[in-house]
Amino acid sequence: MSGTPPDPSRRRFFRQMAGELVSSAAHVVGVVAEVRDRTAAEAQSLLGVEAAEGAATGSAPGPGVALGAPSPTAAPTASPTAAPTAAPTAVPTGFRTPFRFETDDTLLVIDQRALPDALVELPVRTAYDAARLIREMAVRGAPAIGQVAAIGLALSGWLARNAIPRSRDQLVRTAAVHLAAARPTAVNLGWAVGRVREAYERASEAGVAGPEIAAAMRAEADRIVAEATDDHGRLAAFGLEALPDVGDRELRLLTHCNTGPLAGGQFGTALGIVQAAHFAERPVHVFVDETRPYLQGARLTAWELAQAGVPHTLIPDVAAGSLLAAGRVDAILVGADRVAANGDTANKVGTYPLAVLAARHGVPFFVCAPISSVDIGTADAAAIPIEERPAAEVTEIRGIRIAPPGTEVWNPAFDITPAELITGIVTDEGVLRAPFGASIVAAVASRAARRAGAVGD
Ligand code: MRU
C-alpha cells in the first residue's frame, strides 16, 4: 500500500486539537472566542505563512476560521447553481473548515462541488443564500449544514434588525421554514434552525431592540458552532479508544462518504477519529470508497486524508465486498445524518450494504455521530425521511451522460442501517452499545447535563 508519510507538524496539530480542546472546553458558553483564537493560532504556527494569511484575513474571523489555505481577496460571484466555473482562489491545500467569516455580515463557504480541483468560496449573506447552497450541496454533511443554516438565519436576522416587529417576525419565521426544508434527512438542520429561531422569539418577547435581537441570534449560531467543535473533539477521543487493537501492525479502516472537517467543521466525525489515530501515531491505512453517485469519498475524503498525510486507498464502492472477504479491513467507520431513538441510523446511501458485509465477515461496524445527530423524537427508521435527489446525479458524471437518454432513475441520498447491525455508536458521550434505546437516552441526558454545566468535563 502506498501512502504519504505523516507530517510531524500536522501530527501535533491534531493531537492538540483533538486532545487539549476536549479537556479544556468544558463550558461551551463563552468558549467561542477561545476556540476561534486557538484555531487561528494553531493554524498559524503549524501550517505556516499561508495559514497566517488566512487567519488574518477578514475583519472578523468567525469560529469557522479557515485553516491552512490562502484566503481569497474577493469571493467568487458565479452562481452556485452553475457547474463550479468560478476561478479557483487557490490551489487546494491545508486543513479547512467548510466556512469562515469574511466580514461580520458575510460568511464564506467552501463550494464542495468544486473540490478536489479548485478551492472556491461562495458568499452567504442571508438565510436564502444558505438554504440554496445547502440544497445544491455546495455545503453538505449533517453537522456542517446545521451550522451554516444557523449562521444564515442569524445573518437574515441582522438584515431585518431595523424592520418593524411584524415584518421582522414574518421575515425570520419564513426564512427559518425555508432553511429547515432545504434537506430533509439530517436532523441537525432542523434543530439548529430551531435554536436560532427560538433565540429570536425569546429576544423579541423580551422587547429588546432589533440589533440586540440579531445579536442574540448570532450568539446562538456561534454557540452551535462551538458546541460542534467541542463535541467532535470528544467524539474523536472516544473513538480512538474504541478502535480495535491490532498490535504493531497497521490498522486498516474502511470509511464511506465524507465525514471530515468539510462535513462537520474542525474535526469531523468518523474521519476525525481516523485523523486522531494518525496523529496519535497509530499506523493507520484507510480504504475510502468512492460513494457513488455524488463521489464524496473520491472527491472529498481522499482530498482531506491527503491534506492530513493519512495513508489511504480509493476503492470503487462495489469492491468493498471483496476487500472484506479478503480480511483486509479491521473496522468500518461511518457517519450519520440521523440516529433514531432505537439506534437505527440514516446515513449516505451505501452505508447499509457495508453494515451487512461487516456482519457477514465479523468486522466491527461503528457509526460515529455526535449526540446532536441523535433524534430522540424519532422512534425508529420508519419515521426518518429519506431525501431523493435528481436523476442527473446518476445518469451523468460531471456533465457527461453515461446512461441512455430517458432512463428511469431512483436516487435515494441516504439509507437505513438497522440498529442490530451496528457494533457501537461513537458519540461525544462515549461509545454506545446495544441495547441502544437505553444507552441513547442516557447519553442524551448526559450531554444535556454537560451543556447545562451540571457536569464538568
Ligand atoms: O449528502 P451528504 O454528502 O450531505 O451526506 C453526508 C453523509 O451522509 C455523512 O456521512 C453524514 O452527514 C455525517 S457527516 C459528519
Image (spheres, rainbow, N blue to C red):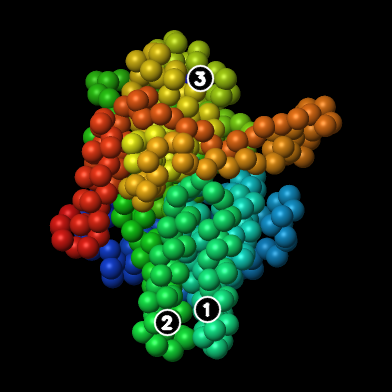
**Disc 3 packing (10 Å; few <14; some 14–19; many ≥20):** many
Q: Is residue 49 visible to us here?
A: no
Q: Residue furthest top?
A: 326
Does the closest atom of ligand 1 sit within 8 Å of the Cβ of label 3?
Answer: no
Secondary element at tag 1: helix
Q: Tag on residue 359?
A: none
The earlier-in-sequence mark between 2 and 3 is: 2
76 vs 155, left or right, is: right
> CB under 8 Å between callouts 2 and 3?
no
User: Would you identify the image quadrant in which residue 130 lies?
Assistant: bottom right
Q: Tag on residue 169?
A: 1
Instruction: Give the answer, above or below, for where 200 lies relative to 284.
Output: below
* Amino acid residing under circle 2: Ser
**Disc 1 packing (10 Å; few <14; some 14–19; many ≥20):** some
Which residue corresponds to the image point at 57% horizontal and 75% vertical from the top-left? 171
The earlier-in-sequence mark between 1 and 2 is: 1
Which residue corresponds to the image point at 47% horizontal and 62% vertical from the top-left? 193
Q: Tag on residue 320?
A: 3
Percent coordinates x, y for residue 287 in the rendering = 47, 26
* Amino acid residing under circle 1: Asp
